[in-house]
Image (cartoon, rainbow, N blue to C red):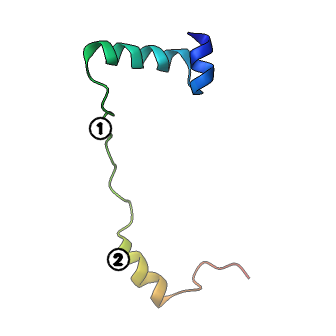
Amino acid sequence: MATASHVFGVTVRTLTNWIKRKERGYLAPKKRRQSPSKIDSEKLKLYISQAPDAYLRK
């Protein structure tokens, strides 16, 4: 199993998890949670257009 993990560039644990998922019949990627953006992109664009050099170091 170590050789296979080296070939695929993953850990032995990851390979073991893949094998378990295959045995269960579920190989589809897991859904991941996406955290909401901390900054509203429209508000950021507006701020940058109003003060484009607010944080530029001189």
User: How many badges with numbers are in the image?
Assistant: 2
The residue nearer to you, when weighing 51 against 12, is 12
Point out residue 52 in the picture as x, y percentages from the top left corner.
54, 86
Q: Residue at x 37, y 72 (%)?
A: 41
Q: Residue at x 55, y 9 (%)?
A: 1
Looking at the image, is 44 positioned above or below residue 19? below
The residue nearer to you, when weighing 20 against 54, is 20
Check residue 7 in the rendering and tell me which mark sits there, or answer none.
Answer: none
- Quadrant of residue 55 within the rendered picture: bottom right
What residue type is disc 2 on? Answer: Glu
Q: Residues within 10 Å of mark 2 (few under 14, many from 20)?
A: few
Furthest toward the right, the residue is 58
Where disc 1 sits, the SS reads: loop
Q: Residue at x 74, y 82 (%)?
A: 58
What residue type is disc 1 on? Answer: Lys
Q: Which residue is mark 1?
A: 31
Where disc 2 sits, the SS reads: helix
Point out residue 14 in the picture as x, y percentages from the top left corner.
48, 20
Of the two numbered discs 1 and 2 on the same chain, state the one appearing first in sequence: 1
- Quadrant of residue 9 within the rendered picture: top right
Q: Which residue is mark 2?
A: 42
Question: Marks 1 and 2: CB-CB under 8 Å?
Answer: no
Q: Residues within 10 Å of mark 1 (few under 14, many from 20)?
A: few
Q: CA distance from mark 1 to mark 2?
A: 27 Å
Image side of residue 34 versus residue 50, left or right: left
Image side of residue 48 versus residue 28, left or right: right
Furthest toward the bottom, the residue is 50
Furthest toward the left, the residue is 25
